[in-house]
Amino acid sequence: MTKTSPPHKIIGVAVIWNDLGQILIDRRLPEGVMGGLWEFPGGKIEPGETVEDCIKREIHEEIGIEIEVGEHLTTIDHTYTHLRVTLTVHHCRHLTGIPQPIECAEIRWVNLDELEQFEFPQANFQIIQVLRQSV
Ligand SMILES: Nc1nc2c([nH]c(=O)n2[C@H]2C[C@H](O)[C@@H](COP(=O)(O)OP(=O)(O)OP(=O)(O)O)O2)c(=O)[nH]1
Ligand SMILES: [Mg+2]
């Protein structure tokens, strides 16, 4: 018998900083996979797209703002029960536009030490740990 692997999603993820040193997080829609959890905005890398292109496009589509994609922060490979994700995370800088919850339930600017007050998917514990060490 062959064991099939769970679907694998390759995701570009943005840690977006504003001039006050805050980070943008969004809350996933209540329905669906990991519904209602908070996350760093991002989404699937499309064929032929670089991670940087993907992050810029997703943030424009989902949040309606322009950002500068900066340094690579970390890449996390995590397997959930029925899903494997590879999250490539970059530091980004907010340039223009007011964040809008276009494809999510809610959006917030938070300080690094406030992140623990929000419920994130399991893979994010690693991202947040690396993030704390990076600043
Ligand atoms: N954007 C983002 N996704 C995350 C984080 N942590 C984490 O486990 N994920 C997972 C949740 C999703 O399964 C996947 C992101 O893919 P996605 O946003 O394109 O997919 P989705 O679940 O919204 O569904 P769909 O677009 O395929 O319909 O990565 C995070 O911090 N940010
Ligand atoms: Mg998404």
Image: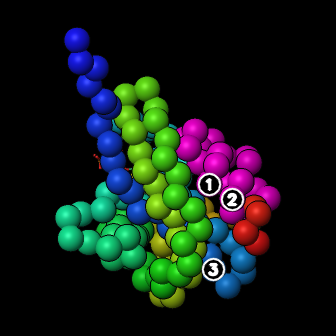
Q: Is residue 16 left or right of residue 10?
A: right
For the residue pair 112 and 65, the one nearer the viewer reads as 112
Q: Residue at x 52, y 58 (%)?
A: 75
Residue 76 position (above or below residue 62): above
Q: How is the image coloured?
A: rainbow
Furthest residue toward right:
113
On-image quarter of the C terminus: bottom right
Horizontal side of residue 59 vs 19, given as left or right: left
Verify CB contact (< 8 Å) between mark 2 and mark 1. Answer: yes
Q: Mark 2 = which residue? A: 130
Indicate which label's residue lies in the foreground, 3 or 1: 1
Q: Which residue is mark 1?
A: 127
* Rendering quarter of residue 102: bottom left
Task: Give the percent coordinates (x, y) of residue 84.
Answer: 39, 39
Amino acid on which disc 1 is placed: Ile
Q: CA distance from mark 2 to mark 3?
A: 19 Å
Asked if residue 24 is positioned above or below residue 56 in the image, the reply reads above
Residue at image position (64%, 49%) is 126
Tell which residue pokes out farthest to the bottom in this image.
Answer: 95
**Considering depth in this image, is 101 or 6 the residue closer to the camera?**
6
User: Of label 3 and label 1, which has the lower sequence position?
Assistant: 3
Query: Which x, y percent locates residue 132?
Result: 75, 61
The N terminus - image quarter: top left
| Dot 1 beta carbon under 8 Å from ligand 1 | yes
State yes or no: discs 2 and 3 in contact (Cβ < 8 Å).
Answer: no
Identify residue type, mark 3. Asn
Q: CA distance from mark 3 to mark 1?
A: 19 Å
State the extent of the magenta-drawn residues as a range: 112-131
Badge 2 residue CB within 8 Å of ligand 1: no
Q: Is residue 122 magenta?
A: yes
For disc 3, the marked residue is 18
